Amino acid sequence: MRGLTYIVTFVDNARTQQSDIINIPGHRFSDGEEVIYSSSGTPIGAGSTSVGFTTTRLTSGAVYFIAKVDDDHVSLSVTKEKALSKTVINMNAFGNGTHKFTSRVNRKIIDRINITKSTDDFSNKRVVVDAVAWPPANQKDLYSSFVGVNVESNYIYARNHSFKTGDNIEYSFDGTTIGGLSTAANYKVTVLDENRFLLSEAGTATTISSVNFDRKSYVDLTSVGVGTHTFKYPAIAITIDGIVSTGDTSVTPSYYNAIGIPVVRGSLDNVFIRNGGAGYGVPDVINYQRSIDVEVQTGKEADIRAIVVDGKLTSAYIANSGSSYTSPPTINIIGSGRLAELNPTIVDGAITAVDIINSGIGYDDNTTIEVIPAGTDAKLNAEIHEWKFNNVERYKKVLQLDNISIPKKDRLNRELVQITSGTSLKESKVVGFYPGAFYRQLLDDNVDSNGDEITTGFSHSPIIGWAYDGNPIYGPYGYAIPLFKEGQSTGGNKKIFSSYEIDVETSGTLRPSGFTNGSFTQDYLYKASGDLDEYNGRFCKTPEFPEGTYAYFSTVDFGGNLAYPYITLSLIHI
């Protein structure tokens, strides 16, 4: 702490015509406070009867007492008793120049806070969720949707949210609240995965409770609300407790209470994307990634000018408010003086106000102000959604799938292709995307001498391979009743159909143009319309597993043509 000589400067026209009241917004003087009046020019005119001796003006350098009218207006008296009784000096004429009141009360202020111990776990995490249901009603919107609210399972979906289980967060909204949530409550997070989290009510900001969190009692979300919803860490704040001395004031004015503004600097840990946009990348060049410049906006072009009176910074003029400020910049005062401190206010990326924390001493008219944005050298790399080729469609000419005159059993290379291995050695590999007709003939899997599907007398397909998860892969045929009871009918053998259907993204800014339907794996959506799940498998009994197993099937359609996903999928493509 240190002592402060409190000074207020005002211009001549602060006193309205024929008024004993001076307009000084937020003057911060107490009623009866002793001050020294001074003027750079002609003092304000005053009547001699109210001063007590023959004079026509206030005396520069003389002592007077504040007769407080309100927080923005004062009058003057010659004694403290008269100030308190509101017997004030009759100010009857303007002066000129600037005028100043210097308090004779030595005020104690907190001029700095020393950090004796810090941690490295301060974070500023925040996600904004649109008031939409998750998952989207149309499955093909999965890949282009990043946020949502699931009222069936009571979770918030925010892709790559970066919260941790046990985090304490605040909720706010712009529109209408999510049913079940309140802005008055704090919440604790239970992470389901990197994209989903549950909420447990955790009291208020001043009384955090872990009872519901420990009991795994989660908020029942009843509606998605309207507008946008924000979930964020509580703001990092400083609380200053102590006895405030306010003299004769019975109620402590707010400006007597010290305010500490924390300055936290660190590195970028995560970037949350609320909307992925559209039209990025290259829609007509295969395997070419166009680089995207990602700018971390920390602010630019702000210009602040210093106004110095009697060696002190009395105000700061914003010549250019700048743009793109996402956090308050550092303000350096450059000049011959010392101790001056400024604090900027940011609204919509621009500096809208500058508060003088300390006016400093010893400054002159050559004083300048430097605005330094917070943070530097961050580099981000944007990943564009990849449209993945359906290799069966991509290589159908090589596989001779487009030439119906060639018998299936005679297709080139037994329906195998040689492609690059994708390793750094630039080697190649021979792959099959499905079991070809030649291979199925060898295994006697319901094909005739030409490799075409037989039309009657189906048998259960044999095992044609094994998946990495250890489950068998069968050909296209299986029992009509997957899990029949012992002694009951299998329902006979039938084609086992995929549940994927072509449902192409219609937006030309999202899906590359010029490609036929089915060219990309994302052109196919799981519709639950067939016999198999989204991984092209099911739980069923088979000749090799009479007690039942999970099995994949190599699928064809009603006409015997190959049906996506051909064998299996390792994941849902989003």
Image: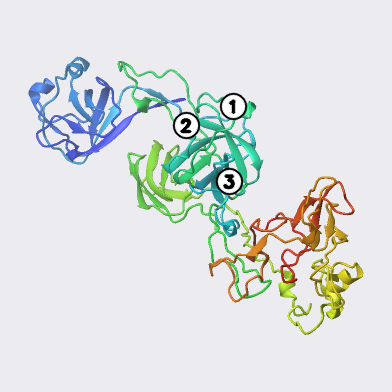
Depicted 12 relative to depicted 507: above or below: above
Name the side, left or right, on which 485 lies relative to 262: right
Q: Position of residue 58 (x, y in %)?
A: 16, 29
Q: Which residue is mark 1?
A: 212
How far is mark 2 from mark 1, CA to CA? 33 Å
Classify 10 Å Cα crowding around label 1: few (below 14), some (14-19), many (20 and above).
some
**Quadrant (top left, top right, bottom left, bottom right) of the C terminus:** bottom right
Image coords of residue 423 (percent x, y): 82, 66
Marks 2/3 in contact by CB < 8 Å: the verdict is no
Q: Residues within 10 Å of mark 2 (few under 14, many from 20)?
A: some
Nearer the observer, disc 2 or disc 3? 3
- Quadrant location of residue 69? top left
Residue plotted at (60% across, 49% down) = 159
Q: Earlier in the sequence, mark 1 or mark 3?
A: 3
* The disc label shown at residue 260, or none: 2
Name the residue beneath numbered marker 3.
157
Task: Name the spot of residue 531 as percent of width and height, x first.
Answer: 72, 56
| Amino acid type for the residue under numbered disc 3 | Tyr
State if disc 3 and disc 1 touch (CB < 8 Å).
Answer: no
Q: How is the image coloured?
A: rainbow
State which tag comes first along the sequence, 2 or 1.
Answer: 1
What type is the residue that disc 2 sits on? Gly
Q: Is residue 520 left or right of residue 423?
A: left
Camera sees residue 162: no
- Considering the numbered disc 3 on the image, is that residue within a helix, a strand or a loop? strand
Observer-nearest residue: 445 or 158?
445
Secondary structure, mark 1, is helix
Residues at circles 2 and 1 in contact by the CB criterion of under 8 Å: no
Q: Quick one: 185 or 99, which is closer to the camera?
A: 185
In the image, 227 versus 257, the foreground residue is 227
